[in-house]
Image (spheres, rainbow, N blue to C red):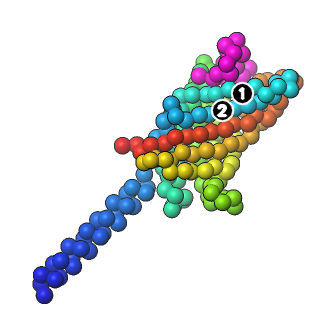
Amino acid sequence: MPAQRTQMYQRLMMLTAGLLYCLVLSAQEYKPVDDSSSVEFGIKNFGVTVSGTVKGLKGTIHFEPGNLSTAAFSVSVDTRTINTGIDMRDNHLKKDDFFYVDSFPTMTFKSTKITPSTKEGFLFIFGDLRIRNVTKAVSFPFQAVPNGEGYTFTGSFTIDRRDFGVGGSSISMSDQAKVTIKISAVPDK
């Protein structure tokens, strides 16, 4: 009888250890991988859509699909990396009437809440977007797709550039800019 109790106790301990290991794996911290991620934008200027990218993605992501109440994103990009494919335009966008990169070298996003979405396969994220010295609340649907040990997060949203003081009072440029993100994230070991 004592040998059976010992075996049962050992099995119970192994099962408990296995469950704890699974919980630790599912509640993981991730970090974005800049080289395999993208932050793209598009805005109409004189009726033509100008597209560009921003690189230098950094930050932390806590993501646990089964417990969205603990999920959190805190990421930034480097405004000095803005690239539309035309150096003269990029240099203009870095000046004080646009992104003023000398004083504001990063754009940041910090989530405040993540919830299920009504659209299957999507989640909904709420957070604060900071561009220049202005912070505004944004929200948008996104997908979280497992990718090896990590995740790929994708989504898009539209902002009003004037809300952030970008582009001054230009009448040739649309007020609405579309931002599309793809964040490849790996475990932060």
SS assignment at label 1: strand
Q: Which residue is mark 1?
A: 51
Q: Which label sits on residue 142?
A: none
Q: Is residue 68 magenta?
A: no
> What is the count of numbered marks?
2
Q: Amino acid at mark 2?
A: Glu
Q: Quadrant of the N terminus?
A: bottom left
The relative height of residue 153 versus residue 107 in the rendered view (above or below) is: below
Task: Report, in whole angstroms, how far the alpha carbon at label 2 lies from the one at label 1.
Answer: 7 Å
- The answer to whether residue 100 is left or right of residue 174 is left
Q: Earlier in the sequence, mark 2 or mark 1?
A: 2
- The answer to whether residue 176 is left or right of residue 181 is right
Q: Is residue 87 magenta?
A: yes
SS assignment at label 2: strand
Given the current orientation, which residue lies at the most extreme bottom position?
Answer: 1
Find residue 95 and report its horizontal and vertical position in percent.
68, 17
- The answer to whether residue 95 shows anywhere in this view is no
Cβ–Cβ under 8 Å for marks 2 and 1: yes
Q: Amino acid at mark 1?
A: Ser
Quarter holding residue 22: bottom left
The residue located at (33%, 60%) in the rendering is 21
The residue located at (74%, 20%) in the rendering is 97
Quarter holding residue 136: top right
Find residue 18 and report its horizontal and vertical position in percent.
31, 65
Near mark 1 (Cα within 10 A), the count class, few <14, some 14-19 or many ≥20, is: some
The residue located at (75%, 25%) in the rendering is 50
Q: Which residue is mark 2?
A: 40
Pick the residue in front: 66 or 168. 66
Q: Which range of residues does the magenta coloring cover?
A: 81-99
Near mark 2 (Cα within 10 A), the count class, few <14, some 14-19 or many ≥20, is: some
